[in-house]
Image (cartoon, coloured by chain):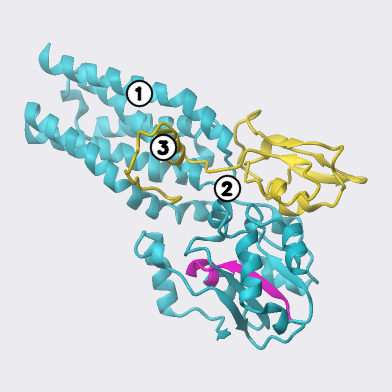
Chain colours: A cyan, B yellow
């Protein structure tokens, strides 16, 4: 059993920063097992978390001055919420980890404190039935743990209300950009080659730049401006941001000289890309449902495809008619 | 949740009050305050706030709650569709939820 500190070092901050950019993100983890924070006694509380190092650090850095046990589950370097969704932060792993770490020999009580976002993977009553440990879901955020422990393990309404602040959205954007780069590069290369073949380098650069900006509008701008974009549908929010972006691009890139078919093609194609990536951000939010996303996809994917088809026809018309 | 609201009338969340024992676990696990215990039973307070995470159903010992929980991003769902139709055999696609 390892004893760990509660003050994050420069290397911890750097590692977290790199992981946010998708660097070493899938291998940013700590060994699962039981850890001691401060000088815990057999009466000290047991907190449970995932073995993604950013989750582990988030918990321990909030608990300076506390004496607690930290039971870290093997989630293969995935955070609590995502791991709970796929079941690795789950009943089976928790039960196994309690046994493997011989938790019952370190503590005299039989209580576990779990993050609320771990609940989709853990059946509390099953854990109790199999191990004798009672489960309490404490808080959504690690930052509320000190207050939770100080006020006698009472979860206030605020501690269980999820948020999605500007900053909380902003930190998600880098990794989304990195994950999307590969497909964007493929589509972009085809687009570049087509425009280069017919219109030369300048046309190819304009087409590629416009397309790339449209993707970024969906991936970065739409999440950042989420509450201010109209409607509830993410596809619609992305499309609106995309139309505004296209208008800016049209003015900034000398759209008046394109001729109307190409200009119209831009206004059909670019918002479709923004809309798709805007819709994709539903996977990162804290409030969208699977059924809602399915409904959005049924309605919006045909519109996006139609929009791209019209755009393609306009481009062909501009060149060959 | 303050400031954000998703589509209405889409959630697959179902609650059977006849089975409910009023233990309050659903209130404890829901990040969107969909449930509240009124008297000796839970009650659906805000069904449309549900994000289908499945925490309530998973933690309901009385099996009074069902919901179709799962991945909620467009690329994840597209991958699921393609795999179900066996169009993605052997191809590993990038994504956040691997």
Q: Which residue is mark 2?
A: A286
Q: Which residue is mark 1?
A: A305
Label 1 CA crowd tier, 10 Å (few <14, some 14–19, many 20+): some
Q: Is residue A22 left or right of residue B60?
A: left
Q: Which residue is mark 3?
A: B83
The CA distance from mark 1 to mark 2 is: 28 Å
From the image, which quarter does the C terminus of chain A lie in? top left
Q: Position of residue A101 (x, y in %)?
A: 62, 78
Q: Secondary structure at mark 2?
A: loop
Image: magenta residue range: A44-56
**Proximity of marks 1 and 2: CB atoms separated by less than 8 Å:** no
Q: Position of residue B18 (x, y in %)?
A: 87, 37
User: Which of labels 3 and 2 is toward the front?
Assistant: 3
**Proximity of marks 1 and 3: CB atoms separated by less than 8 Å:** no
**Quadrant assignment, res A265:** top left
Q: Chain of mark 1?
A: A
The CA distance from mark 3 to mark 2 is: 26 Å
Identified at 44% across, 39% down, the residue is A280
Identified at 26% across, 35% down, the residue is A211
Most foreground residue, A105 or A272: A105
Confirm whether circles 1 and 3 share one chain. no
Q: Secondary structure at mark 3?
A: helix
Q: Is residue B45 left or right of residue A71?
A: right
Identified at 54% across, 73% down, the residue is A32
């Amino acid at each position: 059993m390892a004893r760990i500190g509660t003050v994050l070092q420069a290397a911890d901050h750097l590692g977290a920063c790199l992981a946010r950019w998708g660097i070493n993100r899938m291998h940013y983890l700590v060994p699962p097992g039981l850890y001691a924070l401060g000088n815990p006694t057999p009466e000290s509380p047991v907190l449970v978390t995932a073995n993604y190092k950013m989750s582990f650090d988030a918990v321990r850095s909030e608990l300076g001055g506390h004496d607690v046990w930290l039971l870290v589950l093997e989630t293969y370097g995935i955070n609590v919420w995502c791991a709970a969704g796929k079941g690795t932060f789950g009943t089976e792993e928790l039960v196994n980890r309690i046994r493997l770490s011989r938790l019952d020999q370190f503590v005299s009580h039989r209580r576990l404190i779990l993050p609320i976002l771990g609940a989709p993977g853990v059946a509390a009553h099953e854990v109790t039935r199999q191990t004798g440990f009672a489960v309490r879901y404490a808080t959504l955020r690690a930052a509320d743990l000190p207050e939770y422990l100080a006020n006698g393990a009472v979860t206030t309404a605020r501690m269980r209300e999820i948020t999605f602040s500007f900053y909380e959205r902003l930190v998600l954007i880098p990794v989304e950009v990195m994950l999307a780069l590969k497909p964007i590069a493929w589509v972009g290369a085809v687009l570049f080659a087509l425009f280069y073949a017919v219109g030369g380098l300048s046309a190819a650069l304009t087409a590629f730049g416009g397309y790339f900006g449209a993707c970024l509008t969906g991936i970065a701008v739409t999440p950042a401006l989420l509450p201010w974009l109209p409607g509830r549908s993410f596809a619609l929010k992305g499309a609106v941001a995309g139309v505004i972006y296209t208008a800016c691009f049209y003015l900034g890139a000398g759209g008046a000289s394109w001729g109307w078919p190409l200009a119209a093609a831009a206004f059909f194609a670019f918002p479709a890309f923004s809309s798709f990536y805007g819709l994709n951000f539903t996977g990162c939010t804290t409030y969208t449902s699977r059924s809602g996303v399915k409904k959005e996809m049924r309605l919006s994917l045909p519109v996006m495809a139609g929009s791209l088809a019209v755009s393609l026809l306009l481009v062909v018309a501009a060149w060959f008619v | 949740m303050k400031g954000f609201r998703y589509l209405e009338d889409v959630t697959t969340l179902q609650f059977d009050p006849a089975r409910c024992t009023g233990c309050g676990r659903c209130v404890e696990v829901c990040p969107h305050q969909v449930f509240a215990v009124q008297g000796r039973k839970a009650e659906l307070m805000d069904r449309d706030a549900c994000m289908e995470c499945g925490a309530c159903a998973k933690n309901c010992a009385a099996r009074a709650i069902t919901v179709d929980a799962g991945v909620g991003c467009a690329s994840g769902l597209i991958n699921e569709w393609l795999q179900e139709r066996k169009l993605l055999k052997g191809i590993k696609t990038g994504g956040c939820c691997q």
